[in-house]
Amino acid sequence: MMIRLMNKLLCFLYRHKQLVMIGIFLVVMIYTDYAFAEDNCSEKSDEEKYLCYCDSEVIRKKYVEAGCWACDVIFTLMMSMTDVAGSIYETTKDLSMTILGFGAVIWIALYFLKALGSFTTQDPAKVIDGLLTFCFKVALVYGLIDLGIEAIVQNIVNPLLSIGIDIGNVFSGATGL
């Protein structure tokens, strides 16, 4: 009896996916509007309202102290994806370098066949330029694969994130906008 009821429920959910998603969306919208109903910034002028809403204390109060369930989910997903990416990288490093090499050889062969087999006259400088551009791209990707995740994170990702953090700190410290 219970299994039959579960099967009917699952069939209903499968057939009416859009309706279920709209219902979930409405529940989430109502919850977030209810959970963050306290609004001390709405009576202020536009400039003061902007600074009030963008204050880091207001954001922290809304999400961290209110028990942001989405923050926990995103944190768990990010940690899991980072662990999986690290383990996948170690197992596929050699294979990806081999595939990159074979793909490069095939591309170069097809590139020269297309250039030399054409009935129009080819400019040798453009052919060599296209070849050298492709070889640079392949060398760059090969170097990134060979460096490893730690070097990529330290030399590429962290500097970009620190620039974003510096820009965010400049904007969050702005009081005279």
Image (spheres, grey):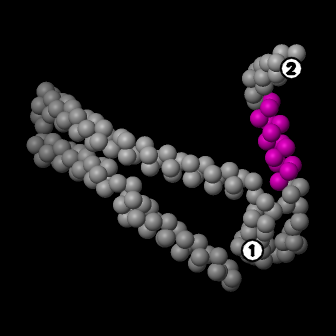
The one nearer the camera, 124 or 145, is 145
Q: Is residue 88 left or right of residue 47?
A: left
Asked whether 30 falls inside the magenta stretch, the response is yes
Judged from the image, the secondary structure of the residue bearing numbered disc 1 is: helix
Q: Which mark is residue 2?
A: 2
Q: Is residue 161 left or right of residue 156?
A: right
Task: Classify 60 as above or below 106.
Answer: below
Q: Earlier in the sequence, mark 1 or mark 2?
A: 2
Q: Residue at x 51, y 51 (%)?
A: 82
Q: Is residue 172 above or below residue 102?
A: below
Query: Where in the figure is residue 111, as x and y percent of width and height?
Result: 19, 34
Question: Which residue is located at x 75 percent, y 65 percent?
Answer: 64
Rendered view: 98 above or below 60: above
Q: Which of the 4 image quarters holds residue 67?
A: bottom right
Residue 144 position, x and y percent, is: 32, 53
* Residue ID for mark 1: 57
Q: Which residues are magenta?
A: 19-32
Specify whether residue 60 is in view: yes
Label 2 residue SS = helix
How far across and down, in percent of the image, does residue 39 sit? 87, 67
Q: Residue at x 83, y 15 (%)?
A: 4
The residue nearer to you, when weighing 115 against 35, is 35
- Name the quarter where the N terminus is drawn: top right
